[in-house]
Image (cartoon, rainbow, N blue to C red):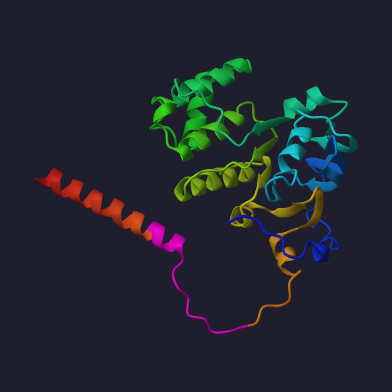
Amino acid sequence: MTLTLRQPSMLAVMSIPPTTNQVQGPAIHVRGLEKSYKELRVLRGVDFEVARGSIFALLGSNGAGKTTAVKILSTLLKADAGTARVNGFDVATQAADVRESISLTGQFAAVDEILSGRENLVLIARLRHLKAPGAIADDLLRRFSLTDAGTRRVATYSGGMRRRLDIAMSLIGNPPVIFLDEPTAGLDPEARIEVWQAVKELAEGGTTALLTTQYLDEAEQLADRIAILHQGRIIVNGTLAELKQLLPPAKVEYVEKQPSLEDVFFAVVGDADKGSQDRTTRSNKK
């Protein structure tokens, strides 16, 4: 499901104040961010905050400016105007401190397919000059349910496994803030759910995650707060419950619930897996 905004003029005037208690201050603070490419104005005064240890979804269609915002926050691009602070550091004047505080996972898994999963993790740990890189790799393999596949070449991994490994590599060095730029783009339904679970576990461990996505269900499943970026501006920002309050109250009607495609998919896949396991068990008994 991709984002379609039907009434941007109505939402543009609405503002929902943050409700999260931010005693330590926000992990990300953005005010008046602007960026243009020649005549194309990509960001037109973007404002938002991300509480520490939370998942913040920046939701928008293709070309809305999501990736541009992430590049500015991760010091890969300079803004034309406005200010942004990440983990307390200014992205323009304290770029080195920002880079030490963050990790960025792009739209495509940046893993070495020739190496094994464990070797990828060990390599990054060594490049960061960390002690006991092997122990760090083994711990991350356990956290992301990749221990059994750890010695296999990454070329044999599924899309979901590669993305989980990519996120695991991003966590080496325990960065307090991680940027996930459309982390499930191109993944199948099972792989998407695997990545969702990994992101949820990050937040439970205290990591702040800024997630960009164009999938409505992804933002709904993961985010503590959701901001909709449309034509270079944040037109609404709030929790899922707050965003739902922008629409008229729902009418209560009796509707017979039909199974969704997701229900069918996992029921069929589960039955097929169960049948395969039963046949293997019977074969072993013989």
Looking at the figure, which quarter contains the N terminus?
A: bottom right
Where residue 250 appears, as percent x and y from the top left, is: 67, 78
Task: Identify the residue at the far left of this view.
Answer: 286
Q: Check the image and report above or below for 163 versus 259.
A: above
Residue 278 visible in the displayed image: yes
Residue at screen point 76% across, 58% down: 238
Residue at screen point 84% across, 38% down: 35
Residue 245, quarter of the rendered image: bottom right
Q: Which residues are magenta?
A: 252-266
Where residue 142 appears, as percent x and y from the top left, is: 47, 34
In depth, the one of 262 and 96 nearer the eye is 262
Magenta highlight on residue 264: yes
Where residue 113 appears, as percent x and y from the top left, is: 46, 24
| 217 horizontally vs 188: left or right | right
In depth, the one of 23 and 80 nearer the eye is 80
Residue 22 visible in the displayed image: no
| 140 horizontally vs 204: left or right | left
Magenta highlight on residue 239: no
Q: Check the image and report above or below for 131 versus 211.
A: above
Where residue 57 appears, as percent x and y from the top left, is: 69, 49
Looking at the figure, which quarter contains the C terminus?
A: top left
Marks counted in the figure total: 0
Residue at screen point 54% across, 84% down: 254
